Structure formats: structure tokens, C-alpha cells
Amino acid sequence: MRSLNVARGRGIRDRRAFTLPEMLIATILMLFVFAMVVPFMRMQTRQIGTGAGRLDALQNARFSQNAIDRELRIAGVGAVPNQPMLVQADPMAVTFNADLSTRDSTDPDAIYYDPYVDTLATSALPFARAITLPRSSTSYPQMDYQSAPGIMGSAETVSYWLSLDSTSAVPNIYVLWRRANDRTASAVSTGIYVAPGTAFFQYFKIDHITGALDSIPNATLPLFHSVAQHATVADTGAASLIDSLRAVSMNVVGMYKDPTSGIVYRTVSTLTKLLNVGLLNRATCGFPPLPIPAAPVVTMYGTIPDSVTITWAASPDQNGGEQSVQRYLVYRQPVGGTTWGDPAADVAAGQTTYEWVDPGFAAMHGAWHYSVIAQDCSPSNSTITLSNTITLP
């Protein structure tokens, strides 16, 4: 009886191992699972990387725009009476005077207090340390701007400009730089795309007949404050054209190179009002803004397209009604698509008609349409207005 039990026990222990057919079946099932899961995981990883890259391009464009807008909108703060507010207006550079930083906690005009800021970048730039303005051969300043005899004014000279990125394998990619007085320039951002023949900065003055903003043609740029003393008899006529500027728009295009679909562009376009030179326009936000009055028009130029341009007219609530429209959001979508996704462009309000050239058209194929919404300062959006359809090869 004992020997029988021992034999049974050995048999039970022997069956605890796997047979060769069982091992083969398990291996085949495991390989089958991996064959299904690995491509799915790779696709998910690529999609996450693509989404993160596109968001990075948009955030880079917004960061660049915000950095300039934050300081440019306070141009003229702390400037002494004979010191110009705007010094240079170039399609790829802007220079202005403002009391941005101070090490003096009692300074009533400075915007930022920083006990560690460079002391040579906290007051007006003296003539003895004159600089060459970016992308020009013009020297500035031509005199000392003093708040009292022997005491320099508190408004420093700030420059933003773009230069080609020599390390980029993609053409027309720029680096955005900032410099205060004659201190060493620092890079604000990289990966900024500027299409050939286009301007990063555009400038506006008041049309005294209509009261609307009127753009300065790029052909008349650059402008410099060529007269040493602001608001003097000499600072009139053609010499004072730069003093008539009331707003600056920026067209910032961030670039991301997607390993699957190629280069992706994200655009942020804004309008910075120069409040200290007479443009204080308070908008009222109540009801959502009215949509644009007619369907936007999309035009494709060339059989093998050279460009795709979308044009539209201002919302009635921009210059009339509540006067609350701050920007226009442009979307694009393949015909038959179900969602519009993120805006392809964010265009600042301020003109009567608008034109936006899509920098990403080369990667688009098939039938596409666009849409435009107006957005106020709430922000609230108007209803969507759909464009015509274009078919890209």
C-alpha cells in the first residue's frame, strides 16, 4: 500500500513540469501578443511625440511673442522729456526706451525690481557707450539723456532682433535676441521661422481721416529716431515718422520637425499697443462678438502651389458695436474631418481686412477648408464662419 502511494506521489510530481508542445504553444502565443502590442505602442509613442512637438512649436511662438509684448507695451515709461520712446522700427528689429529694471527699491517708475541686475543696464545709455543698433549701421544715442544735471535718466535702451540660425538644417530659421543698453545680448528663443520676403514686425500709425490703424509699408522701413532730442523743432516732418507709430504687430511662427510628417509650423500673430504714445483703447466685453460678415476666401496660387492665402473682413464688433474683438483664430481641416483641432493661426485685431499665408500648405494634400472665429477680451468666441474648399495635389 505504501509503495502504491509513493508511486502516485512521484507521478503527481512529474506532472508539474511543462511538456514540449505546451512550451511551443506558449511561445507562439507570446510572440503573437508581442506582434500585436509592439506596433500599437510604437504608434502611440509617435503620436505622443508629434503632439508634444506641435505644442512645443506653439509654446515657443507664444513665449517669443509674450517676451516682446510684455516690455514693448510699456515703451516710454520713465523716459525723460527729450528721450525718444521708439528708437528703431525695422522689419526684423525693434528698439525702445523704458525703465524696466532697477536695483533701487524706491524707484517709482521702474517696472521690475531686481537687486542683482547689472547696474549698467538700469539707466539711460550714455553717449560715451553708444551702440550700433541691430541689423543697421546707425549709432545710438547721440547725446546723454539726463533727469538732472549730471544724473542719467532711468529708462534703458532695449533691443529685440532676429538673426539667421547658422546651426539649423532647415532654411529661414532664426534666433530671437534681446539686449539692454550695451550689455551682452541673450537669446530669447530659437526655432523661429520667417518666410523669405516677409516681416517679423509690422508697424501702425493712426489714419487721421478714418481714425483706424494704418500699416506702415515695409518699403519705407527701417525708421530711426534720427534727431537727438525728442519733441524739439527738429523732431518734425519725416524725422518724426517713428514718433507717430502707435502699435506693433508680430507674426511669430514656431517650427517643429516631425520625423513622420515633416516640418510643422504654428503661428501666433498679435498686436501690441504703445499705450504711452497716445493709444489707450479700452474695450468692453459683454456678449460674444459677432462673426465676420462674409465667408473667408482661400486662394491657392500656382498649379504646383506656391502659397495658400486666406483673407477675411473684420467683425462688426471690432470697430463698431462693443468694439471688443481682440483677435481672430484661423482653423484648417480636411474636408470630411470631424474636429478642427488647435488654431493654425492667432491673428491680432486692428485692421479692416486680413490676409494670412499658411506656412504649412506644402505638407497638405487633398481637399481642405478653413474657418475663422472672432474672439473678444473675455475671451468669448463668435460663431464659426467656413471658407471655400481648395484641393491640393
Image (spheres, rainbow, N blue to C red):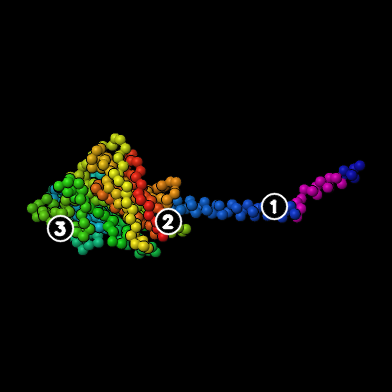
Q: Please report the bounds of the magenta region as a residue range.
A: 7-20
Q: Is residue 159 left or right of residue 387?
A: left
- Residue depicted at 54% across the width and 54% down the height: 42
Pointer 3: what residue? 226
Q: Amino acid at mark 3?
A: Ser
Q: Is residue 101 visible?
A: no
Pair 2/3: label in front? 2
Report the front residue among 101 and 241. 241
Q: Is residue 118 left or right of residue 126?
A: right
- Residue depicted at 17% across the width and 46% down the height: 210
Magenta stretch secondary structure, dominant:
helix
Secondary structure at badge 2 equals strand
Task: Tell me, for residue 26, which label it has, or none.
Answer: 1
Q: Amino acid at mark 1?
A: Ala
In the rendered view, tell whether residue 156 sits above or below residue 1.
below
Which of pointers 2 and 1 lies earlier in the amino acid sequence?
Answer: 1
Asked if labels 1 and 3 touch by Cβ distance under 8 angstroms, the answer is no
Disc 3 packing (10 Å; few <14; some 14–19; many ≥20): many
Which of pointers 2 and 3 lies earlier in the amino acid sequence?
Answer: 3
Pair 2/1: label in front? 2
Pointer 2: what residue? 366
Which of pointers 3 and 1 lies earlier in the amino acid sequence?
Answer: 1
Q: Residue furthest top?
A: 286
Pair 3/1: label in front? 1
- Residue depicted at 85% across the width and 45% down the height: 8
Measured in 3D between alpha carbons, the distance from the residue under mark 2 to the one under mark 3, in whole angstroms, is: 52 Å
Magenta stretch holds residue 300: no
Secondary structure at badge 3 equals loop
